[in-house]
Image (cartoon, grey):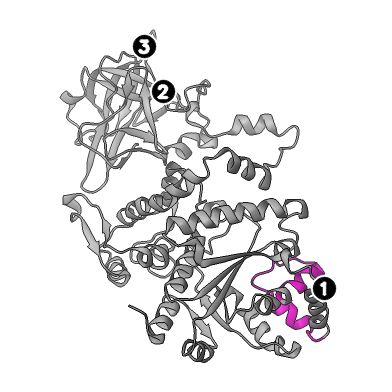
């Protein structure tokens, strides 16, 4: 059934922060569909925040709009040369491939889209003359103001940064659009276009603006800030790691990048309920039909941030999997390597960097047999264990398991021990290793990790993919290697211990737990 002009407008405006010139859009929709263009400068690698405009482009297409996507290669060069001239062509090819893969992953019919490269028309005689005409009527003040939130700001700006807003304004005329779509950070460029295009005899266009979606750190998601964004080709393990670190304060619905992604991407694209899986003791599974229901529940702290992140992780990987598969081709892997070449490290820094790498192979994790367990004489919550780790002499290990794990479940049992921490005295007794356990705070549950059946004291435990390399003799406390690695150690929903999605194993198989799952390892 065909949509009415009112229904089309409502779909176009969904989740937008602001519309300039809505009256123009209303008039056009009375006689024909709207022509919209969205441009992206081909600089850094696109990340998951690009799903926000992709979701809106899907809305525009569903509203019957004719949509043009501009790969703004010349803009990328003018913005403080973020993209070197010799890489422009390669980056355009990468952007086209990855954006098409994104659109396919959300079910957009690419035949309804028009793709244009900026330099295909921006170097023409007519366009160049218009740039000169524009420069004769625009003041330096207005050019600086227009680019203030989009062009990189430096102490000594280049003249190219002043040209940037003018080119974006002229694109509206040369792409023959009725409206330009972009983020609200481009509002000053949009008002610049509305002011100066008529001075060249061109009509004023409407402008549709998305809100700026917070990144994972709570600020704007940026290609240049590694911790604030998830790359479109990140592995599931990398997605898990970055989401785990994401800012998602209980009850905070304003500066929450995880919730914003739900609002602007996951909910608009879903045709079924948004489901959050939880343990029965934590309230059980719950489903939400609208984003407003989810936001209300989160604001009332009925949804734990960890449960929300787990749900988003699953849905996000569903979106990313088709993109990852597309980029498994040798041709596209070669394109990435050429478009974004890895910067060579300076001579003299390489050795130090390799030494400072924080990788699991630095940990000396071994199977140990607990030969005896006693209560610490000075602390009710501590056990003192004697442990055979395959060495000439057993080690003494102090663990905070009293009251949590019965002595009899430890004595003469095998466990998994971190053996190269610096020895530390706990209430007067020196502990020379640490028993690794799966640990949940609420409801409080602690369970020592279990090595594979048939294991023997001294068997090495390693993370899959990190079996080569020798552990450090002793982890230096100042480098905090254990602390940095421990944040990504967990037991998954299959009771298997893992680090960043890579399993902890011995030569005989996987390290597991019997009861505790979905928990950190401490």
In what element is the residue under mark 3?
A: loop
Name the secondary structure under disc 1: helix
Residue located 31% across and 13% down the image = 456
Q: Which residue is mark 3?
A: 390
Q: Residue at x 46, y 71 (%)?
A: 61
Q: Which residue is mark 2?
A: 419
> What is the x, y in percent for residue 200?
75, 87
Marks 1, 3: nearer the viewer: 1
Pointer 2: residues within 10 angstroms few (<14), some, or many (20+)? many
Give the quarter of the figure containing the C terminus: top left
Separation of residues labelled 1 and 2 (CA atoms)? 71 Å
Residue 125 image label: 1
Task: Between residue 241 and residue 72, name the one nearer to us.
Answer: 72
Q: Which mark is residue 357?
A: none
Q: With respect to residue 300, does 45 lie above or below?
A: above
In terms of secondary structure, where does tag 2 sit?
A: loop
Stretch of the chain drawn in magenta? 137-165
Q: Nearer the viewer, mark 1 or mark 2?
A: 1
Residue 326 at x, y percent in the picture: 50, 46
User: Horizontal placement of 410 versus 261: left or right?
Assistant: left
Q: Earlier in the sequence, mark 1 or mark 3?
A: 1
Q: Nearer the viewer, residue 213 or 100?
A: 100
């Amino acid at each position: 059934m065909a949509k009415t002009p009112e229904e089309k407008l409502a779909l176009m405006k969904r989740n937008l922060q602001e519309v300039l010139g809505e009256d123009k859009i209303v008039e056009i929709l009375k006689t024909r569909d709207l022509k919209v263009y969205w441009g992206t400068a081909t600089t850094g690698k696109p990340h998951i925040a690009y799903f926000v405009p992709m979701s809106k482009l899907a809305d525009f297409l569903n509203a019957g709009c004719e949509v043009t996507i501009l790969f703004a290669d010349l803009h990328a060069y003018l913005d403080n040369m973020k993209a070197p001239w010799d890489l422009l062509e390669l980056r355009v090819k990468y952007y086209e491939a990855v954006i098409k893969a994104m659109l396919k992953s959300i079910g957009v019919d690419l035949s309804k889209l028009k793709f244009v490269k900026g330099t295909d028309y921006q170097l023409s005689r007519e366009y160049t003359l218009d740039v000169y005409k524009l420069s004769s009527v625009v003041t330096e003040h207005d050019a600086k103001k227009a680019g203030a939130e989009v062009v990189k700001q430096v102490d000594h700006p280049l003249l190219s940064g002043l040209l940037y807003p003018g080119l974006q304004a002229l694109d509206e005329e040369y792409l023959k659009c009725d409206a330009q779509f972009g983020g609200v950070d481009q509002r000053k460029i949009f008002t610049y276009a509305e002011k100066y295009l008529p001075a060249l005899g061109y009509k004023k266009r409407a402008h549709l603006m998305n809100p700026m979606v917070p990144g994972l750190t709570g600020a704007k998601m940026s290609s240049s800030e590694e911790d604030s964004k998830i790359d479109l080709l990140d592995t599931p393990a990398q997605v898990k790691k970055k989401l785990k670190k994401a800012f998602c304060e209980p009850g905070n619905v304003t500066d929450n990048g995880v919730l914003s992604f739900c609002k602007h991407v996951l909910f608009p694209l879903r045709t079924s309920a948004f489901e959050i899986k939880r343990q029965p003791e934590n309230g059980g599974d719950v489903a939400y039909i609208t984003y407003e229901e989810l936001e209300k529940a989160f604001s009332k702290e009925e949804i734990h941030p960890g449960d929300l992140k787990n749900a988003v992780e699953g849905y996000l990987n569903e979106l990313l999997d088709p993109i990852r598969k597309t980029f498994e081709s040798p041709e596209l892997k070669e394109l990435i390597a050429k478009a974004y070449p890895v910067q060579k490290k300076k001579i003299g820094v390489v050795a130090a960097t390799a030494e400072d790498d924080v990788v699991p192979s630095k940990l000396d994790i071994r199977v140990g047999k607990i030969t005896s367990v006693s209560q610490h004489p000075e602390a009710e919550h501590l056990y003192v264990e004697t442990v055979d780790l395959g060495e000439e002499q057993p080690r003494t290990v102090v663990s905070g398991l009293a009251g949590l794990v019965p002595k009899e479940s430890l004595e003469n049992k095998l466990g998994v021990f971190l053996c190269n921490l610096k020895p530390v005295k706990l209430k007067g007794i020196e502990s020379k290793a640490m028993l690794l356990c799966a640990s949940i705070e609420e409801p409080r549950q602690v369970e020592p990790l279990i090595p594979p059946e048939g294991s023997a004291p001294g068997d090495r435990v390693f993370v899959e993919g990190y079996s080569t390399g020798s552990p450090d003799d002793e982890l230096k406390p100042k480098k905090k290697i254990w602390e940095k690695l421990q944040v990504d150690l967990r037991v998954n929903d299959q009771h298997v211990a893992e680090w960043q999605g890579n399993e902890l194993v011995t030569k005989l198989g996987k390290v597991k737990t019997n009861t505790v799952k979905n928990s950190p390892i401490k």
